Image: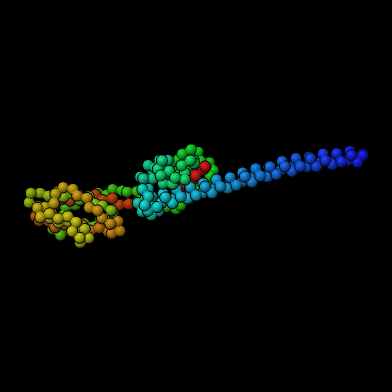
């Protein structure tokens, strides 16, 4: 092989090497860009899922009765639009919210993405009723705490109920006698004792109260962009 032929061969090898190097560099840049994009998407999904989970259990949220205690009825009525109001970051993503094994709201088909879990309490309001006959200075203690009590007084022609006290505080009073139904707002932190000032014979009092029942559960939020 002459010197010119060897030179041409070397140039050809160099050209091929440059083509291969350029292709490898391009693939490397593509892979790096893809990894960067994937990492950014993963971080966005994690932020959105964390934000939504935090808003769902916040004390100020419409989905709770207090911090980290979910209102069962409010959670079960959630819509995808509600989730966007709570956490705008989920607006363009597939999203799922679960309580335990039950899905309460879902949009799209989130199959990957980021998942955040929180241990919570789920509160259900129950209704209890009592009907009692009371005479003067009789008292009734409710066995479970509640945030309100409906008191309905039914008296005969010779009987009046002038005052109802809750834990020694005057809650209802009428010198002409109480009649009909009234709702009393109470503290869920106190056991309630109702005292009645009755003039005459016995009066019939119907009480309805609404104790809270809580169960522990896992809140799971998945966001897949």
- The front one of 121 and 96 is 96
- Residue at 44% from the left image edge and 51% from the top image edge: 54
Q: Quadrant of the N terminus?
A: top right
Residue 176 appears left or right of 45: left
Where's residue 96, x and y in %?
47, 43
- Residue at 66% from the left image edge and 44% from the top image edge: 29
Where's residue 95, x and y in %?
47, 42
Where's residue 122, x and y in %?
39, 50
Residue 78 appears left or right of 192: right
Instruction: State how many labels appear.
Output: 0
Where's residue 198, x and y in %?
12, 56
Residue with the most extreme bottom position:
168
Residue with the most extreme left position:
158
Q: How is the image coloured?
A: rainbow
Residue with the most extreme right position:
2
- The front one of 173 and 199 is 173
Residue 185 appears left or right of 119: left
- Residue at 22% from the left image edge and 52% from the top image edge: 184
Residue 186 figure quarter: bottom left
Q: Is residue 51 visible?
A: yes
Residue 195 appears left or right of 159: right
- Residue at 14% from the left image edge and 55% from the top image edge: 173
Q: Is residue 216 visible?
A: no
- The front one of 36 and 213 is 36
């Amino acid at each position: 092989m002459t010197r010119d032929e060897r030179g041409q061969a070397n140039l050809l090898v160099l050209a091929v090497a440059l083509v291969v190097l350029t292709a490898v560099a391009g693939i490397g840049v593509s892979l790096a860009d893809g990894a960067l994009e994937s990492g950014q998407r993963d971080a966005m999904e994690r932020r959105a899922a964390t934000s939504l989970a935090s808003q769902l259990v916040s004390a100020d949220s419409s989905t709770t009765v207090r911090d980290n205690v979910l209102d069962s009825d409010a959670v079960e009525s959630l819509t995808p639009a509600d989730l966007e109001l709570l956490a705008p970051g989920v607006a363009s993503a597939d999203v799922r919210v679960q309580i335990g094994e039950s899905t309460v709201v879902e949009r799209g088909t989130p199959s990957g993405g980021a998942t955040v879990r929180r241990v919570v309490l789920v509160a259900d309001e129950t209704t209890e009723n009592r009907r009692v006959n009371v005479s003067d200075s009789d008292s009734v203690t409710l066995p479970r705490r509640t945030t309100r009590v409906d008191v309905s007084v039914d008296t005969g022609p010779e009987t009046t109920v002038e005052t109802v006290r809750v834990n020694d505080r005057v809650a209802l009073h009428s010198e002409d006698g109480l009649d009909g139904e009234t709702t009393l707002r109470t503290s869920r932190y106190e056991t309630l004792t109702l005292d009645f000032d009755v003039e005459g014979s016995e009066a019939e009092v119907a009480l309805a109260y609404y104790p809270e029942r809580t169960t522990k559960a896992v809140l799971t939020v998945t966001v897949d962009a």
